[in-house]
Amino acid sequence: ETGVTQSPTHLIKTRGQQVTLRCSSQSGHNTVSWYQQALGQGPQFIFQYYREEENGRGNFPPRFSGLQFPNYSSELNVNALELDDSALYLCASSFGTGPGPQHFGDGTRLSIL
Amino acid sequence: AQTVTQSQPEMSVQEAETVTLSCTYDTSESDYYLFWYKQPPSRQMILVIRQEAYKQQNATENRFSVNFQKAAKSFSLKISDSQLGDAAMYFCAYRSGGGGSNYKLTFGKGTLLTVNP
């Protein structure tokens, strides 16, 4: 069973740039959720994708957007990067939209200079 | 909106001893799920234990058990026979169980657990 994989592991960008983070869901999972974890904080929900459609969104501005592909992998795109976007971005996959366990990847550490 | 509070930023325990991590939450829902996740320095969030709110019985997973007090909205994690590998950041999390399109996890700020040899 292949777990959740995220790429890249670490990324450095400057303010105003755009970034794309990638996530491959665990085998058999069709739902992907993205979380932002600032240093010393718990993760905060960004949005969830189910069957290629956004299925719920947290309190993040529209410059945070996403995609889910037919193979259930997903991308998180952030435009016009700000210093506060520096964080660990976690992807979690699950089966369906029920309260089954979410399985997390190792995250992408994004640093904004 | 639901909130999760972990009042202990840091805890330490001696190897082989028992430690309890505290978590309280606020919700108006009756159907929900509670989780404890472990995040070691490797960064991956690992599910430790899960509790369904409608179940009276406290969940147990090997050395990990919870004390779920629904009326008090309290959900503590007990780690017995602590091992060096238990050292990590521990997060308490809440998830709605009812219908709807959003099954997000709401996390507390975490408790950093140190295990001393």
Image (spheres, coloured by chain):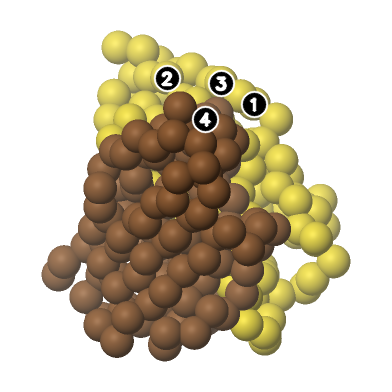
Chain colours: A brown, B yellow
* Residue to which mark 3 is pinned: B10
Verify CB contact (< 8 Å) between mark 3 and mark 1.
yes
Disc 2 from disc 4: Cα separation: 18 Å
Residue positioned most to the front: A16
Q: Which residue is mark 4?
A: A39
Helix, strand or loop at disc 1?
Answer: loop
Q: Amino acid at mark 3?
A: Glu
Percent coordinates x, y for residue A26 in the rendering: 26, 70
Evaluate whether residue A80 shows in this view.
Answer: yes
Amino acid on which the number 2 mark rests in the picture: Thr
Other residues around mark 1 within 10 Å, as few (<14) / some (14–19) / many (≥20) = some
The location of residue A79, given as percent across then percent down, is 51, 54
Q: Identify the chain of the residue marked 3, using the numbered disc in the image.
A: B
Say which amino acid is labelled 1: Gln
Q: Which residue is mark 1?
A: B8
**What chain does mark 4 sit on?**
A
Query: Share a chain, discs 1 and 2?
Result: yes
Q: Nearer the viewer, residue B79 or A88?
A: A88
Q: Quick one: B77 or A51, which is closer to the camera? A: A51
For label 4, count other residues whose C-alpha is less than 10 Å away and answer few (under 14), some (14-19) or many (20+).
few
